[in-house]
Amino acid sequence: MEFYKSKIKGTGMYVPEKVLTNADLEKMVDTNDEWIYTRTGIRERHICSTEGGEWPTDMALKASVQALEAANLEPNDIDMILFASVTPDAKLPNSACILQVKLGITNNCAALDIAAACSGFVYGVNLANSMIQTGAAKNVLVVGSEMLSREVNWEDRSICILFGDGCGVAVVGRNEDSDQSEILSSTLGADGTGAEFFDQPVGGAVEPITPEHIEKRTHMMQMKGGEMFKMATRTLANNAKKVIKEAELTLKDVDWLVPHQANVRIIETTGKLLGIDSEKVIINIDKYGNTSAATVPIAFHEAIHDGRIKRGDLVLFDAFGAGLTSGATLLRY
Ligand code: ACO
Protein backbone atom coordinates (compact mmCIF):
# COMPACT_ATOMS: atom_id res chain seq x y z
CA MET A 1 0.00 0.00 0.00
CA GLU A 2 1.27 3.44 -0.88
CA PHE A 3 2.00 5.69 2.10
CA TYR A 4 1.59 9.48 1.76
CA LYS A 5 3.16 12.33 3.71
CA SER A 6 0.80 14.88 5.24
CA LYS A 7 1.42 18.47 6.27
CA ILE A 8 -0.40 21.55 7.55
CA LYS A 9 -1.12 23.57 4.43
CA GLY A 10 -2.87 26.60 5.94
CA THR A 11 -4.45 28.00 9.10
CA GLY A 12 -7.10 30.52 10.15
CA MET A 13 -8.76 31.89 13.27
CA TYR A 14 -11.67 33.98 14.46
CA VAL A 15 -12.52 35.37 17.88
CA PRO A 16 -15.77 37.21 18.70
CA GLU A 17 -15.82 41.00 18.77
CA LYS A 18 -16.98 41.35 22.37
CA VAL A 19 -14.17 41.36 24.95
CA LEU A 20 -14.85 40.55 28.60
CA THR A 21 -12.05 41.78 30.86
CA ASN A 22 -11.20 40.76 34.42
CA ALA A 23 -12.50 44.19 35.46
CA ASP A 24 -15.85 43.31 33.87
CA LEU A 25 -15.90 40.04 35.85
CA GLU A 26 -15.25 41.96 39.08
CA LYS A 27 -18.73 43.47 38.56
CA MET A 28 -20.32 40.03 38.08
CA VAL A 29 -18.78 37.83 40.81
CA ASP A 30 -16.61 38.23 43.92
CA THR A 31 -13.21 38.21 42.21
CA ASN A 32 -10.45 40.57 41.15
CA ASP A 33 -7.96 41.05 38.33
CA GLU A 34 -4.97 40.24 40.55
CA TRP A 35 -6.39 36.85 41.67
CA ILE A 36 -7.36 35.85 38.14
CA TYR A 37 -4.09 36.95 36.53
CA THR A 38 -1.73 35.44 39.10
CA ARG A 39 -3.64 32.13 39.34
CA THR A 40 -4.43 31.67 35.63
CA GLY A 41 -2.54 34.16 33.45
CA ILE A 42 -5.81 35.44 31.97
CA ARG A 43 -6.51 39.17 31.46
CA GLU A 44 -9.48 38.98 29.09
CA ARG A 45 -11.52 36.65 26.91
CA HIS A 46 -13.83 37.03 23.87
CA ILE A 47 -17.53 36.23 24.09
CA CYS A 48 -19.86 35.33 21.19
CA SER A 49 -22.86 37.44 20.35
CA THR A 50 -26.14 35.71 21.20
CA GLU A 51 -27.82 37.67 18.40
CA GLY A 52 -26.32 35.41 15.71
CA GLY A 53 -23.41 35.74 13.30
CA GLU A 54 -20.93 34.27 15.78
CA TRP A 55 -22.25 30.75 16.36
CA PRO A 56 -19.54 28.07 16.40
CA THR A 57 -20.06 27.30 12.69
CA ASP A 58 -20.06 31.03 11.81
CA MET A 59 -16.69 31.46 13.50
CA ALA A 60 -15.53 28.28 11.75
CA LEU A 61 -16.64 29.66 8.38
CA LYS A 62 -14.56 32.81 8.81
CA ALA A 63 -11.50 30.88 10.04
CA SER A 64 -11.87 28.21 7.32
CA VAL A 65 -11.97 30.80 4.52
CA GLN A 66 -8.62 32.13 5.80
CA ALA A 67 -7.16 28.63 6.13
CA LEU A 68 -8.24 27.64 2.61
CA GLU A 69 -6.76 30.81 1.18
CA ALA A 70 -3.46 30.18 3.00
CA ALA A 71 -3.48 26.60 1.67
CA ASN A 72 -4.30 27.85 -1.85
CA LEU A 73 -7.31 25.54 -2.02
CA GLU A 74 -10.98 25.89 -2.97
CA PRO A 75 -13.78 24.66 -0.66
CA ASN A 76 -14.49 21.71 -2.97
CA ASP A 77 -10.86 20.54 -2.62
CA ILE A 78 -11.78 19.50 0.94
CA ASP A 79 -12.77 15.84 1.16
CA MET A 80 -13.35 15.68 4.90
CA ILE A 81 -14.37 18.07 7.69
CA LEU A 82 -13.48 17.22 11.30
CA PHE A 83 -15.23 19.64 13.66
CA ALA A 84 -13.98 19.51 17.26
CA SER A 85 -16.32 21.14 19.77
CA VAL A 86 -18.14 20.56 23.05
CA THR A 87 -20.47 23.43 22.16
CA PRO A 88 -21.81 22.51 18.71
CA ASP A 89 -24.48 24.71 17.08
CA ALA A 90 -27.07 21.96 17.69
CA LYS A 91 -27.31 18.29 18.68
CA LEU A 92 -28.40 17.46 15.13
CA PRO A 93 -27.20 17.96 12.45
CA ASN A 94 -23.55 17.91 13.40
CA SER A 95 -21.59 21.14 13.05
CA ALA A 96 -19.34 19.67 10.35
CA CYS A 97 -22.41 19.28 8.10
CA ILE A 98 -23.58 22.84 8.85
CA LEU A 99 -20.10 24.15 8.00
CA GLN A 100 -20.03 22.12 4.78
CA VAL A 101 -23.12 24.02 3.58
CA LYS A 102 -21.86 27.41 4.80
CA LEU A 103 -18.60 26.89 2.89
CA GLY A 104 -20.53 25.98 -0.27
CA ILE A 105 -18.93 22.53 -0.50
CA THR A 106 -20.96 20.47 -2.99
CA ASN A 107 -18.79 17.35 -3.27
CA ASN A 108 -20.58 15.44 -0.46
CA CYS A 109 -17.35 15.29 1.57
CA ALA A 110 -17.33 13.38 4.86
CA ALA A 111 -18.32 15.52 7.85
CA LEU A 112 -17.72 14.42 11.42
CA ASP A 113 -17.88 16.11 14.83
CA ILE A 114 -15.30 15.24 17.48
CA ALA A 115 -16.31 15.45 21.16
CA ALA A 116 -12.94 15.24 22.87
CA ALA A 117 -13.11 18.56 24.76
CA CYS A 118 -9.86 20.52 24.83
CA SER A 119 -7.95 17.76 23.03
CA GLY A 120 -10.46 17.81 20.16
CA PHE A 121 -8.34 19.74 17.66
CA VAL A 122 -5.29 17.54 18.26
CA TYR A 123 -7.52 14.47 17.90
CA GLY A 124 -8.66 15.94 14.58
CA VAL A 125 -5.15 16.64 13.28
CA ASN A 126 -3.96 13.14 14.20
CA LEU A 127 -7.01 11.45 12.64
CA ALA A 128 -6.62 13.60 9.51
CA ASN A 129 -2.96 12.59 9.35
CA SER A 130 -3.88 8.89 9.41
CA MET A 131 -6.55 9.36 6.73
CA ILE A 132 -4.09 11.19 4.50
CA GLN A 133 -1.22 8.76 5.07
CA THR A 134 -3.39 5.85 3.94
CA GLY A 135 -4.82 7.72 0.95
CA ALA A 136 -8.38 7.75 2.35
CA ALA A 137 -8.41 11.57 2.25
CA LYS A 138 -6.38 14.26 0.52
CA ASN A 139 -7.33 17.54 2.20
CA VAL A 140 -8.97 17.58 5.62
CA LEU A 141 -10.36 20.72 7.25
CA VAL A 142 -9.74 20.41 10.99
CA VAL A 143 -11.74 22.86 13.11
CA GLY A 144 -11.75 23.69 16.82
CA SER A 145 -14.64 26.05 17.55
CA GLU A 146 -16.25 26.78 20.90
CA MET A 147 -18.93 28.97 22.44
CA LEU A 148 -18.21 28.00 26.04
CA SER A 149 -19.90 31.16 27.32
CA ARG A 150 -23.19 29.26 26.82
CA GLU A 151 -22.17 26.45 29.18
CA VAL A 152 -20.48 28.45 31.94
CA ASN A 153 -22.24 29.33 35.17
CA TRP A 154 -21.63 33.06 35.25
CA GLU A 155 -22.43 33.09 38.99
CA ASP A 156 -19.64 30.59 39.85
CA ARG A 157 -16.37 32.48 40.24
CA SER A 158 -14.31 29.29 40.32
CA ILE A 159 -15.16 28.51 36.68
CA CYS A 160 -16.51 31.59 34.85
CA ILE A 161 -13.17 33.40 34.94
CA LEU A 162 -11.42 30.63 33.00
CA PHE A 163 -13.21 30.27 29.68
CA GLY A 164 -13.70 32.17 26.44
CA ASP A 165 -15.08 31.70 22.91
CA GLY A 166 -13.21 31.39 19.62
CA CYS A 167 -12.19 29.25 16.68
CA GLY A 168 -9.04 27.99 15.01
CA VAL A 169 -8.74 25.93 11.81
CA ALA A 170 -6.02 24.03 9.97
CA VAL A 171 -6.05 22.41 6.54
CA VAL A 172 -4.16 19.12 6.83
CA GLY A 173 -3.37 17.77 3.40
CA ARG A 174 -1.24 15.39 1.35
CA ASN A 175 2.25 16.84 0.80
CA GLU A 176 2.73 16.61 -2.94
CA ASP A 177 5.65 19.04 -2.95
CA SER A 178 9.27 18.18 -2.29
CA ASP A 179 9.39 20.42 0.80
CA GLN A 180 10.24 19.11 4.27
CA SER A 181 6.85 19.93 5.86
CA GLU A 182 5.39 16.81 7.45
CA ILE A 183 3.48 15.46 10.42
CA LEU A 184 6.17 13.29 12.00
CA SER A 185 4.53 11.52 14.93
CA SER A 186 1.38 11.62 17.00
CA THR A 187 -0.29 10.14 20.04
CA LEU A 188 -3.86 10.09 21.34
CA GLY A 189 -5.15 8.78 24.64
CA ALA A 190 -7.80 8.99 27.32
CA ASP A 191 -8.37 8.06 30.94
CA GLY A 192 -12.11 7.80 31.49
CA THR A 193 -11.63 7.22 35.21
CA GLY A 194 -10.94 10.96 35.54
CA ALA A 195 -14.33 11.94 34.09
CA GLU A 196 -15.58 13.44 37.37
CA PHE A 197 -12.83 16.07 37.41
CA PHE A 198 -14.52 17.99 34.61
CA ASP A 199 -18.02 17.12 33.48
CA GLN A 200 -21.48 18.28 32.52
CA PRO A 201 -23.72 15.28 33.22
CA VAL A 202 -27.04 17.08 32.89
CA GLY A 203 -28.50 17.60 29.42
CA GLY A 204 -27.73 14.19 27.93
CA ALA A 205 -29.92 11.12 27.47
CA VAL A 206 -29.53 10.00 31.11
CA GLU A 207 -30.58 13.25 32.74
CA PRO A 208 -32.42 15.78 30.58
CA ILE A 209 -32.47 19.42 31.69
CA THR A 210 -35.45 20.28 33.93
CA PRO A 211 -36.67 23.68 35.22
CA GLU A 212 -35.07 22.74 38.56
CA HIS A 213 -31.67 22.31 36.93
CA ILE A 214 -32.04 25.69 35.27
CA GLU A 215 -33.03 27.33 38.55
CA LYS A 216 -30.07 25.79 40.42
CA ARG A 217 -27.71 26.03 37.39
CA THR A 218 -26.73 22.38 37.77
CA HIS A 219 -26.84 21.85 33.98
CA MET A 220 -23.61 23.81 33.46
CA MET A 221 -19.99 22.62 33.26
CA GLN A 222 -18.42 21.72 36.61
CA MET A 223 -14.75 21.26 37.38
CA LYS A 224 -12.42 20.18 40.16
CA GLY A 225 -9.63 22.58 39.22
CA GLY A 226 -6.93 21.24 41.50
CA GLU A 227 -7.33 17.64 40.25
CA MET A 228 -7.31 18.82 36.62
CA PHE A 229 -4.14 20.76 37.28
CA LYS A 230 -2.23 17.71 38.57
CA MET A 231 -3.43 15.40 35.79
CA ALA A 232 -2.69 18.00 33.12
CA THR A 233 0.99 18.60 33.77
CA ARG A 234 1.79 14.88 34.06
CA THR A 235 -0.11 13.96 30.90
CA LEU A 236 1.21 16.83 28.79
CA ALA A 237 4.82 16.01 29.68
CA ASN A 238 4.40 12.25 29.03
CA ASN A 239 2.72 12.73 25.65
CA ALA A 240 5.35 15.23 24.52
CA LYS A 241 8.14 12.78 25.38
CA LYS A 242 6.31 9.99 23.56
CA VAL A 243 6.03 11.79 20.20
CA ILE A 244 9.62 13.03 20.42
CA LYS A 245 10.87 9.49 21.02
CA GLU A 246 8.76 8.08 18.20
CA ALA A 247 10.27 10.61 15.76
CA GLU A 248 13.78 9.78 17.04
CA LEU A 249 14.38 13.43 17.94
CA THR A 250 15.14 15.17 21.25
CA LEU A 251 13.30 17.87 23.18
CA LYS A 252 16.21 20.21 22.31
CA ASP A 253 15.20 19.91 18.64
CA VAL A 254 11.76 21.44 19.34
CA ASP A 255 11.49 25.01 18.03
CA TRP A 256 7.98 25.68 19.37
CA LEU A 257 5.74 24.11 21.97
CA VAL A 258 2.08 24.96 21.27
CA PRO A 259 0.22 23.72 24.36
CA HIS A 260 -3.45 23.78 25.26
CA GLN A 261 -4.10 27.07 27.06
CA ALA A 262 -5.93 26.12 30.29
CA ASN A 263 -3.77 27.92 32.85
CA VAL A 264 -0.42 29.66 32.41
CA ARG A 265 0.92 27.82 35.46
CA ILE A 266 0.14 24.45 33.83
CA ILE A 267 1.92 25.60 30.66
CA GLU A 268 4.99 26.86 32.55
CA THR A 269 5.21 23.73 34.69
CA THR A 270 4.98 21.53 31.59
CA GLY A 271 7.70 23.56 29.86
CA LYS A 272 9.94 23.11 32.91
CA LEU A 273 9.25 19.36 33.16
CA LEU A 274 10.28 19.06 29.51
CA GLY A 275 13.26 21.41 29.81
CA ILE A 276 11.96 23.60 26.96
CA ASP A 277 13.03 27.29 27.14
CA SER A 278 10.14 29.58 28.02
CA GLU A 279 10.69 31.70 24.89
CA LYS A 280 9.92 28.61 22.77
CA VAL A 281 6.50 28.16 24.39
CA ILE A 282 3.54 29.86 22.69
CA ILE A 283 1.28 31.48 25.28
CA ASN A 284 -1.75 33.66 24.48
CA ILE A 285 -4.09 32.71 27.34
CA ASP A 286 -3.89 36.32 28.60
CA LYS A 287 -6.00 37.45 25.60
CA TYR A 288 -8.42 34.56 25.10
CA GLY A 289 -8.70 32.43 28.27
CA ASN A 290 -9.40 28.74 27.75
CA THR A 291 -11.26 28.26 24.46
CA SER A 292 -11.11 24.44 24.73
CA ALA A 293 -10.64 22.82 21.29
CA ALA A 294 -9.75 26.21 19.80
CA THR A 295 -6.71 27.09 21.94
CA VAL A 296 -4.06 25.12 20.03
CA PRO A 297 -5.07 26.21 16.49
CA ILE A 298 -5.51 29.85 17.57
CA ALA A 299 -2.08 29.91 19.27
CA PHE A 300 -0.51 28.17 16.25
CA HIS A 301 -2.12 30.53 13.73
CA GLU A 302 -1.13 33.66 15.69
CA ALA A 303 2.49 32.54 16.01
CA ILE A 304 2.67 31.87 12.26
CA HIS A 305 1.20 35.27 11.49
CA ASP A 306 3.42 37.28 13.81
CA GLY A 307 6.46 35.59 12.24
CA ARG A 308 7.56 33.39 15.15
CA ILE A 309 6.71 30.00 13.60
CA LYS A 310 8.25 29.60 10.15
CA ARG A 311 8.12 26.85 7.53
CA GLY A 312 10.63 24.17 8.46
CA ASP A 313 10.32 24.74 12.25
CA LEU A 314 9.73 21.73 14.50
CA VAL A 315 6.40 22.28 16.29
CA LEU A 316 4.85 20.28 19.12
CA PHE A 317 1.08 20.40 19.80
CA ASP A 318 0.21 19.16 23.29
CA ALA A 319 -3.34 19.06 24.69
CA PHE A 320 -5.50 17.53 27.41
CA GLY A 321 -9.11 17.98 28.37
CA ALA A 322 -12.29 16.70 29.93
CA GLY A 323 -12.82 12.98 29.54
CA LEU A 324 -9.98 12.94 30.40
CA THR A 325 -8.63 13.06 26.86
CA SER A 326 -5.15 13.94 25.65
CA GLY A 327 -3.09 14.09 22.50
CA ALA A 328 0.14 15.39 21.00
CA THR A 329 1.45 15.98 17.48
CA LEU A 330 5.03 16.57 16.36
CA LEU A 331 5.33 18.23 12.98
CA ARG A 332 7.76 19.96 10.69
CA TYR A 333 5.73 23.05 9.70
N1 ACO B 1 -11.59 34.93 42.52
C1 ACO B 1 -11.16 35.03 43.80
N2 ACO B 1 -11.02 33.96 44.59
C2 ACO B 1 -11.34 32.75 44.09
C3 ACO B 1 -11.80 32.59 42.76
C4 ACO B 1 -11.94 33.75 41.97
N3 ACO B 1 -12.36 33.71 40.70
N4 ACO B 1 -12.04 31.28 42.53
C5 ACO B 1 -11.72 30.64 43.66
N5 ACO B 1 -11.31 31.52 44.60
C6 ACO B 1 -10.86 31.24 45.97
C7 ACO B 1 -11.35 29.93 46.48
O1 ACO B 1 -12.64 30.03 47.04
C8 ACO B 1 -10.31 29.60 47.52
O2 ACO B 1 -10.60 30.33 48.68
P1 ACO B 1 -10.36 29.70 50.15
O3 ACO B 1 -8.88 29.44 50.22
O4 ACO B 1 -10.85 30.76 51.05
O5 ACO B 1 -11.15 28.42 50.16
C9 ACO B 1 -9.02 30.17 46.95
O6 ACO B 1 -9.43 31.15 45.97
C10 ACO B 1 -8.12 29.15 46.29
O7 ACO B 1 -8.91 28.36 45.39
P2 ACO B 1 -8.31 27.15 44.59
O8 ACO B 1 -9.38 26.50 43.80
O9 ACO B 1 -7.49 26.30 45.51
O10 ACO B 1 -7.29 27.93 43.62
P3 ACO B 1 -6.22 27.33 42.64
O11 ACO B 1 -4.94 27.97 42.89
O12 ACO B 1 -6.28 25.83 42.57
O13 ACO B 1 -6.73 27.87 41.24
C11 ACO B 1 -7.84 27.20 39.22
C12 ACO B 1 -7.98 27.45 40.71
C13 ACO B 1 -7.41 28.49 38.56
C14 ACO B 1 -9.18 26.75 38.68
C15 ACO B 1 -6.76 26.12 39.00
O14 ACO B 1 -7.00 25.01 39.83
C16 ACO B 1 -6.72 25.63 37.57
O15 ACO B 1 -6.47 26.37 36.65
N6 ACO B 1 -6.90 24.32 37.37
C17 ACO B 1 -6.84 23.70 36.09
C18 ACO B 1 -8.01 24.05 35.30
C19 ACO B 1 -8.01 23.28 34.04
O16 ACO B 1 -7.22 22.39 33.84
N7 ACO B 1 -8.90 23.62 33.19
C20 ACO B 1 -8.97 22.98 31.95
C21 ACO B 1 -9.73 21.74 32.04
S1 ACO B 1 -9.81 20.83 30.55
C22 ACO B 1 -10.38 21.87 29.47
O17 ACO B 1 -9.66 22.76 29.14
C23 ACO B 1 -11.79 21.75 28.96
Image (cartoon, helix red, strand yellow):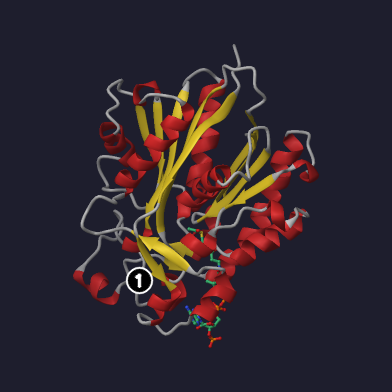
From this viewpoint, is residue 315 visible?
yes
- Residue at the disc numbered 1: 153
Q: Residues within 10 Å of mark 1 (few under 14, many from 20)?
A: some
Residue 264 horizontal/vertical position (percent): 60, 64
Quadrant placement of the N terminus: top right
In this rendering, the answer to whether 269 lies above or below 5 is below
Residue farthest along the bottom direction in this orientation: 30
Residue 144 horizontal/vertical position (percent): 43, 45
Out of 215 and 160, give the one closest to the viewer.
160
Residue 134 horizontal/vertical position (percent): 55, 19
Residue 230 horizontal/vertical position (percent): 63, 65
From this viewpoint, is residue 201 visible?
no
Out of 323 and 173, give the one closest to the viewer.
173
How many badges with numbers are in the image?
A: 1
Give the side of residue 80 with respect to residue 244, left or right: left
- In which quarter of the view is residue 103 placed? top left
Mark 1, ligand 1, within 8 Å: the answer is: no
In this rendering, the answer to whether 254 lies above or below 39 is above
| Residue beneath the point at 47% across and 60% down | 288
Dot 1 amino acid type:
Asn
- In which quarter of the view is residue 96 placed? top left
Out of 255 and 273, give the one closest to the viewer.
255
- In which quarter of the view is residue 155 placed? bottom left
Out of 312 and 326, give the one closest to the viewer.
312
Give the side of residue 293 with respect to residue 188, left or right: left
| Residue beneath the point at 24% across and 71% down | 214
Quadrant placement of the C terminus: top right
Give the side of residue 133 with respect to residue 101, left or right: right
| Residue beneath the point at 25% across and 50% down | 53
| Residue beneath the point at 60% across and 44% down | 307
In the structure shown, which secondary structural element does the residue marked by tag 1 occupy?
loop
Residue farthest along the front direction in this orientation: 307
